[in-house]
Image (cartoon, rainbow, N blue to C red):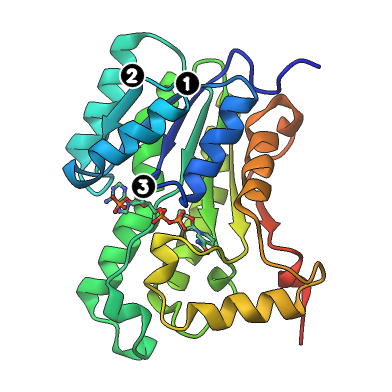
Amino acid sequence: MSKLLEGKTALILGVANKWSLAYAIAQAFRREGADLILTYQGERQEQSVKQLAADLSVTRVVPCDVSQDAEVDRLAEMLRSEGDPIDAIVHSIAFANREDLSRPFVQTSREGYLLAQNVSSYSLVAVSRAIAPLMSKGGSILTLSYLGAVRVLPNYNVMGVAKAALESAVRYLAYDLGPSNIRVNAISAGPVKTASARGIADFNTILNHVAARSPLRRNTDPAEVADAAVFLASDLGRGVTGNVLYVDSGFQIMGL
Ligand code: NAP
């Protein structure tokens, strides 16, 4: 059987370590034959991300802090100079101040609110605007969301509001980029223990609740998120845009 992403080039933003959802997606994309370009935020992560890239036989690893327009533009310029069209973007990035993920939401500062929106939501718009012109054959843009966008999860707070904006941005971007045959979707993943998730107070309570109450009675495996990402990036997903696909053991359907 031919591989689902053979001949495609994907830009993946948000690999920090081997627990990152972006790393699971990178592994699945490689398995399906995609060429990859990985980004990392800053010098602190450079060596570890380069090592993970080497494990996947990926040689293109570039810095990009998505809160800096100049860095997003530099990434686009570098990709343009290489001349390869980009077929898929995976935006797997979020950040909020730790104190905003533990105290009551009503205490969120203006600065903390804007920081979460900037890194976790606006960055999808910035990256899409910069890279879409390189998606000359059309393609797929994917971001990662969470149930906290549409329901209240204690302590998710400002990140839930950022994810709500992110999911709305997915719909507006899908409308704008549809005529270029670029599809824009989100995967709303069930909770997974990653570095980012550790910043959310009482995260284990959420994990235990999902494992006990979701229809599949277990937590989400990052490989399940990654396989859904393959579907959306591949031609199998060609009719799907503006969607939020839940890969969460079915937890989002539950009322109790
Ligand atoms: P992760 O491994 O910590 O990934 C988050 C990534 O965002 C890291 O690579 C981090 O880089 C990067 N990042 C933060 N600020 C950045 C910036 N200014 N510029 C560039 N990169 C930046 O955690 P994860 O759980 O895999 O998160 C990936 C995505 O999945 C996030 O959008 C998250 O909200 C979403 N998600 C996670 C879960 C879950 O339960 N884990 C569930 C649903 C959705 P540094 O490490 O260098 O800061």
Q: Nearer the viewer, mark 2 or mark 3?
A: 3
Mark-to-mark CA distance, 2 and 3 = 21 Å
In the rendered structure, find residue 79 and report the number of the disc placed on it: 2
Mark-to-mark CA distance, 3 and 1 = 22 Å
Q: Residue at x 37, y 78 (%)?
A: 101
Q: Amino acid at mark 2?
A: Leu
Q: Position of residue 24 (x, y in %)?
A: 55, 43
Q: Look at the picture and state if 31 lies above or below 65.
A: above
CB of mark 3 near ligand 1 (< 8 Å): yes
Q: Residue at x 39, y 45 (%)?
A: 14
Q: Amino acid at mark 3?
A: Ala
Residue 175 located left or right of residue 120: right
Q: Position of residue 199 (x, y in %)?
A: 37, 72
- In what element is the residue under mark 1? loop
Q: Position of residue 34 (x, y in %)?
A: 56, 21
Label 3 belongs to which residue? 16
In the rendered structure, find residue 86 and report the number of the disc placed on it: 1
Q: Residue at x 53, y 23 (%)?
A: 87
